[in-house]
């Protein structure tokens, strides 16, 4: 397989050629696709990168694409108003799919953001769940004031 570059994917995404971008990504590992998506979003600052992730979430592994969408919202596209609120939605969806420390930490990451989209009560519930899975989790302890 030829190595797909960020420019190849960015060109397809910014011209809304999602079907072709999907074909480019089909034989790649999820981590490779996520990396290309993030690089493309940083370079183009285009909402079409996010649009492609939404397109793919409906067609492929929902969990993988929710993670990518979360990362897009808190990293390259965080300057868009409402990005952290969307990231919170995706973190909650991931927790519904699989209640892991990684997914719960996503919620706590947003809790610590300036946008204030996660309540203290929701953060504490997530922290308690994290400690049940990983009793020495530092982040969860900090949220609960035991750090």
Image (tube, rainbow, N blue to C red):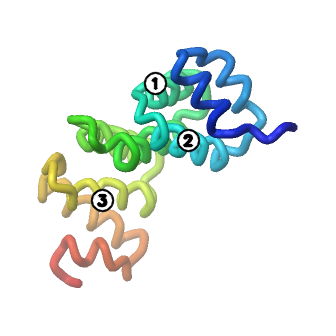
Percent coordinates x, y for residue 79 in the rendering: 27, 42
Q: Quadrant of the C terminus?
A: bottom left
Comparing marks 3 and 1, which lies closer to the viewer?
1
Q: Position of residue 37 (x, y in %)?
A: 55, 39
Who's the residue at 13% across and 52% down the image? 119
Calculate the distance from the C-alpha at mark 3 to the C-alpha at mark 2. Answer: 19 Å
Numbered disc 1: secondary structure: helix
Which residue, given by chain and number where applicable, does mark 2 sit on? 64
Crowding near the residue tagged with mark 1, few <14, some 14–19, many ≥20 C-alpha atoms within 10 Å: many
Kindly identify which numbered label has been placed on residue 109. Answer: 3
Q: Label 2: few (<14), some or many (≥20) within 10 Å?
A: some
* Closer to the camera in the image, 136 or 142: 142
Q: CA distance from mark 3 to mark 1?
A: 25 Å
Using residue 35 as the reference point, say whether residue 115 is left or right of it: left
Q: Are marks 3 and 2 in contact (CB under 8 Å)?
A: no
Q: Going 63% across and 41% down the picture, which residue do you hit? A: 33
- Which of these two is toward me, 11 or 67? 11
Considering only vertical position in the picture, is 57 above or below 39?
Answer: above
Q: Residue at x 51, y 22 (%)?
A: 14
The residue located at (20%, 71%) in the rendering is 143
> Circle 1 is placed at which residue position?
48
N-terminal of the pair, mark 1 or mark 2, is 1
């Amino acid at each position: 397989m030829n190595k797909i570059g960020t420019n190849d994917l960015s060109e397809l995404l910014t011209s809304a050629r999602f079907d072709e971008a999907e074909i480019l990504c089909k034989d790649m590992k999820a981590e490779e696709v996520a990396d290309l998506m993030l690089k493309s979003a940083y370079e183009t600052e285009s909402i079409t990168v996010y649009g492609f992730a939404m397109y793919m979430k409906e067609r492929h592994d929902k969990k993988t694409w929710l993670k990518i969408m979360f990362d897009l919202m808190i990293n390259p596209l965080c300057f868009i108003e409402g990005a952290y609120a969307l990231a919170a939605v995706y973190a909650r969806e991931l927790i519904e799919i699989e209640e892991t420390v990684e997914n719960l930490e996503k919620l706590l990451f947003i809790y610590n953001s300036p946008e204030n989209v996660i309540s203290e009560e929701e953060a504490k519930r997530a922290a308690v769940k994290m400690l049940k899975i990983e009793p020495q989790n530092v982040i969860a302890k900090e949220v609960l004031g035991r750090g």
